[in-house]
Image (tube, rainbow, N blue to C red):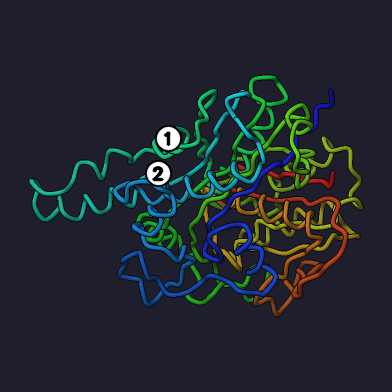
Amino acid sequence: MSNNIYIQGLGIISAIGNNVQECLDALQNRADGIAEMRYMQSAHKHELPVAEVKKSNRQLAEMAGMPASLTRTALLSAIAAKEALADTAIENIADWKVGFISANTVGGMDKTEDFYKEFLQDTSKGKLRDIANHECGSATEIVAEQLGATDYITTISTACSSSANSIFYGARLIRNGILDIAIAGGADALTKFTLNGFNTLMILDKEPCKPFDENRKGLNLGEGAAYVVLVSERVMKTLSKQPYCKLSAYCNANDAYHQTASSPDGTGSYLAMKGALERSGLRLADIDYINLHGTGTQNNDSAEGTAIKRLFDPHYPKLSSTKAYTGHTLGASGGVEAVFASLAIKHGLIYPNLRFETQIADQPFAPETQLIRQDVKNVLSNSFGFGGNCSSLIFSKV
């Protein structure tokens, strides 16, 4: 039996759609989800655009079939994970060893903020249930129970590379015989904590972001959840539905340069991409598309671009950042972009980099600006986080 890991199911909810089909339609129709805040209450409401999921907590709870008192992170996670599992055509997961590996960075911070506001005004006020699910692992445990995934449950929190890391950790668990099936990805909800934190770093754009543009001014925060269902070849061969693609390689690297900034020479980014390519056995020319980490900040885009130049020069694959659609969903971003990479292979798509106008002066390549339909065999997906935690995944046609 081969050691291949297959992507058998996809699930997503984001600012551009409440399921896989809606997100795919938005990607093809250049419909981004970045707008003025509607559901999150902030002093920056009219100043800082965000990419919100277009549903209230009550509406999300109805979609998830769960109580509205739960954290928004847990509700988003449940919706996407349930869609991914339903998409697999696996009739009875109890026949297999199934794990849930989920990532997030804010946990139940949204509910904690509700408690804190009331508690500050009167220390006898505030609902304690609002802080019961504060920590990051709580959402994972709540959703794992909903899924019936009980053989292995864990939470990954490595900043913006979190759900990319959860995906390749799931693959490693399958390859080592610990699991047959891994539901892997991540979720994060918008909170005042993250908005104010990123604003303090002065890396938020007051307009919809323009990743990899010479005149980029920062990122837009987003929210959402996305999961892929990874299966072994043994499981895949029992199913009536063909897999989307396979996860052919992955690599994590850390240059430990700075707490929040990428190293100017993109060392971590370079090592992650190079390591994934070496493990895949593919040549540089075999990569058809790079889904950039591409946040739109000066530092990140410059560092990632420098790493791509170092690795691929002088022949560059087509590339773009889909964060111009979804905003930066933090702990969910690697999962969101894994779903997009899988769809790119299945449907033969390379997505446009919205709002791109001017090529970065010291970079010899520019992102794609139009939707391209072509055969896509291999996609490199980048997720680079604070603290230098950099991960690259390679998805390949079956």
Measuring 37% from the left and 70% from the top, which residue is drawn there? 38
Residue found at the very far bottom of the displayed protein: 357
Q: Position of residue 148 (x, y in %)?
A: 50, 31
Q: Position of residue 296 (x, y in %)?
A: 60, 66
Write down the residue under mark 2.
107
Write down the residue under mark 1.
137
Report, in whole angstroms, how far the alpha carbon at label 1 lies from the one at label 2: 7 Å
* Quadrant, the C terminus: top right
Residue 59, compared with residue 146, is above or below; it is: below
Q: Which quadrant of the structure image shows residue 20?
A: bottom right
Q: Position of residue 74 (x, y in %)?
A: 41, 45
Q: Please indicate whether residue 81 sits to the left or right of residue 192 in the image.
A: right
Say which amino acid is labelled 1: Gly
Residue 116 seen from this side: yes
Say which amino acid is labelled 2: Gly
1 or 2: tag closer to the N-terminus: 2
Measuring 75% from the left and 33% from the top, which residue is drawn there? 236
Q: Please indicate whether residue 145 sits to the left or right of residue 364 in the image.
A: left
Q: Helix or strand or loop: what does disc 1 sit on?
A: helix
Q: Residues within 10 Å of mark 2 (few under 14, many from 20)?
A: many
- Marks 1,2: beta carbons within 8 A: yes
* Quadrant, the N terminus: top right
Q: Helix or strand or loop: what does disc 2 sit on?
A: loop
- Front in this rendered view, residue 213 or 4: 4
Measuring 33% from the left and 52% from the top, which residue is drawn there? 110
Q: Which quadrant of the structure image shows residue 128?
A: top left
Count of marks overlaid on the render? 2
Q: Please indicate whether residue 54 sits to the left or right of residue 110 in the image.
A: right
- Front in this rendered view, residue 14 or 94: 94
